[in-house]
Image: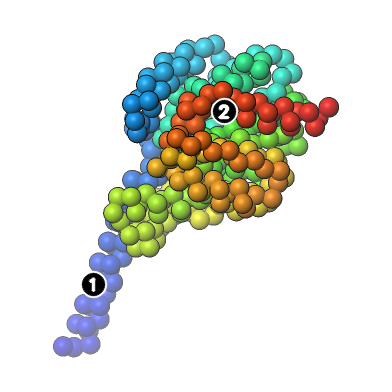
Amino acid sequence: MSKLAILIISLSILFTIFALSILVSRYAYKRAFYFPPTHPVLPFYASNEDEEEILKGLNDSSRLLCNEDYEPIFIESFDHLSLFGRYYHVKDGAPLFIEFHGYKGDACRDFSGGDMIFKSLRFNTLLVDQRAHGQSSGRTITFGVNESYDCLSWARYARERFGDIPIFLVGISMGGSTVLMASNLDLPKNVKGIISDCAFSSPKEIICKVCRDIGLIPRLIYPFVTLGAILFGGFNPNKRSAIKSVKESRVPIMIIHGEADKFVPCQMSSEIFESCTSEKYLHTFKNAGHGFSFASDVPRYEHLVKEFIFNQLEKIK
């Protein structure tokens, strides 16, 4: 065989490998990160009959929350997306809670329970549609990487509009990771606390965990996931993580997680807690699945959240 023929065959093989890598990476991007407005919200999955009943109540509560009077707010992200939020005004000068929902979730549904706690205290709330969700623009979910900078933008907007009122950042699931990843950014000084419920430790760890759950080998798949995110989503999922960010946090953090969480292991919150260098608290709920800590024990959840809030507000006096 001539040298030219060998060269052509070698180039053909390389091109085939390259093309397959691009195709696999694009498929990985579409499965993990792509979320256009036409896609349905990812449902909560109940693991028992009690959680089934809880879900019915959450659906009713979410409809009520979305139908309450609110002020629609739009701000621009650092990369020029339009971000949408619902501002619920209760009292002038009251603390503000900015709330971030989960992966492929819905803001009203994910905070249909927790939002009631803040309003019962006569506090104002800002319910955010994360990028690529709801009325916010974009088609790529970045697992908290870019969303953490969106969180910073919302906090700065609140500081500029409402002045030096106490601000708390609250998130559930991916939203929990979002607020934790924002903890080491240049947040306004009046951000007095962060509450994170069932967050994952890093994009890589949760993606690899899901890969294992569906019978894939993470060390073989994750490089394609990373390549797909970079090529088609314009971000690097390894750039930021909750577990790294809290090492540089100066904001008090309360971490909540259900011990029966089969989607985001409770161990991830334990690892985040151990890495955190700011004032920190960890509370787990024994029989709670993913996102069900509040509903599994409402009195305890309310007590812990209120205790954390009042402890931080007391420092201001």
Q: Comparing marks 1 and 2, which lies closer to the viewer?
A: 2
Q: Residues within 10 Å of mark 1 (few under 14, many from 20)?
A: few
Give residue 63's position: percent from left, percent from top.
43, 15
Q: What secondary structure is found at the residue carrying circle 1?
A: helix
Tag 2: Cα neighbours inside 10 Å, few (<14), some, or many (≥20)?
many
The colour scheme used to paint the residues is rainbow
- Disc 1 marks a residue whose amino acid type is Ser
Q: Which residue is mark 2?
A: 301
Q: Is residue 173 above or below residue 122?
A: below
x, y percent for residue 107 = 48, 27
Image-quadrant location for residue 92 = top right
> Which of the pair 6/17 is nearer the observer?
17
Query: Which residue is nearer to you in this view: 134 or 244?
Result: 244
- Residue contact at pointers 1 and 2, CB within 8 angstroms: no
As drawn, is 277 to the left or to the right of 85?
right
Q: Earlier in the sequence, mark 1 or mark 2?
A: 1
* Residue appearing at x 74%, y 32% in the figure: 312
Taking 289 as reference, is 28 left or right? left
Residue 257 lies, with reference to residue 26, above or below; the image says above
**The one of 144 and 117 positioned closer to us in this rendering:** 117
Q: Residue furthest right?
A: 317
Q: Quadrant of the C terminus?
A: top right
Identify the residue at image location x=62%, y=21%: 118
Quadrant location of the N terminus in the rendered image: bottom left
Whether residue 154 is visible = no
Relative height, residue 32 to residue 171 (above, below):
below
Q: Would you say 21 lies left or right of 307 here? A: left
Percent x, y for residue 14? 28, 72
Residue 170 visible from this viewpoint? yes
In the rendered structure, find residue 12 and report the number of the disc placed on it: 1
